[in-house]
Image: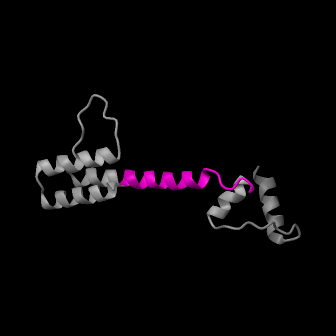
Amino acid sequence: SAYKVLTELQELVESKGSQTRFVDATNRFYTLIPHDFGMSKMKILDTAEAVKTKTEMLDNLLEIEVAYSLLKGGDTKDDPIDAHYKKLKCELQPMDKKDDHYKRLCDYVQNTH
């Protein structure tokens, strides 16, 4: 996985590995996670900062993937919003209109919108 390659690159940085090993690991990373360099030269991931930046990028991509999987539909028999809450393991219950919390929320909505 790309995380495994980044771990290897981090170990190379710490042990001051050879340029050949950095190039090999960087090529494997870019094979797993394609980048568009345009006309510029591929950046070798040979510093702790470069590895950290790519790790953060992977973390963000993973979060996007999780969010997308939550949003990409559920059972067609359920309301889409209910399906999303179910995936989040949340349960919504209607409030009693006589409840003080309900009245407070109504007042809040009236006064802020």
* Residue 8, percent from left and from top: 23, 59
* Residue 110, percent from left and from top: 81, 54
* Residue 102, percent from left and from top: 82, 66
Which residue range is magenta in the image? 56-78
Q: Residue at x 33, y 57 (%)?
A: 3
- Residue farthest to the front, as pictured: 76
**By what rule are the colours in the image chosen?**
one colour
Q: Nearer the viewer, residue 34 or 13?
A: 34
Q: Residue at x 74, y 57 (%)?
A: 78
State the image quarter where residue 86 is shown. bottom right
Q: Is residue 48 above or below residue 43?
A: below
Q: Residue at x 35, y 46 (%)?
A: 33
Q: Is residue 69 magenta?
A: yes
Q: Nearer the viewer, residue 5 or 59?
A: 5
Q: Is residue 39 above or below residue 51?
A: above
State the image quarter where residue 101 is shown. bottom right
* Residue 57, percent from left and from top: 38, 50
- Residue farthest to the top, as pictured: 39
Q: Is residue 50 left or right of residue 86?
A: left
Q: Is residue 10 left or right of residue 84?
A: left
- Residue farthest to the bottom, as pictured: 99
Q: Quadrant of the N terminus?
A: bottom left
Q: Residue at x 85, y 71 (%)?
A: 99
Q: Is residue 102 left or right of residue 17?
A: right
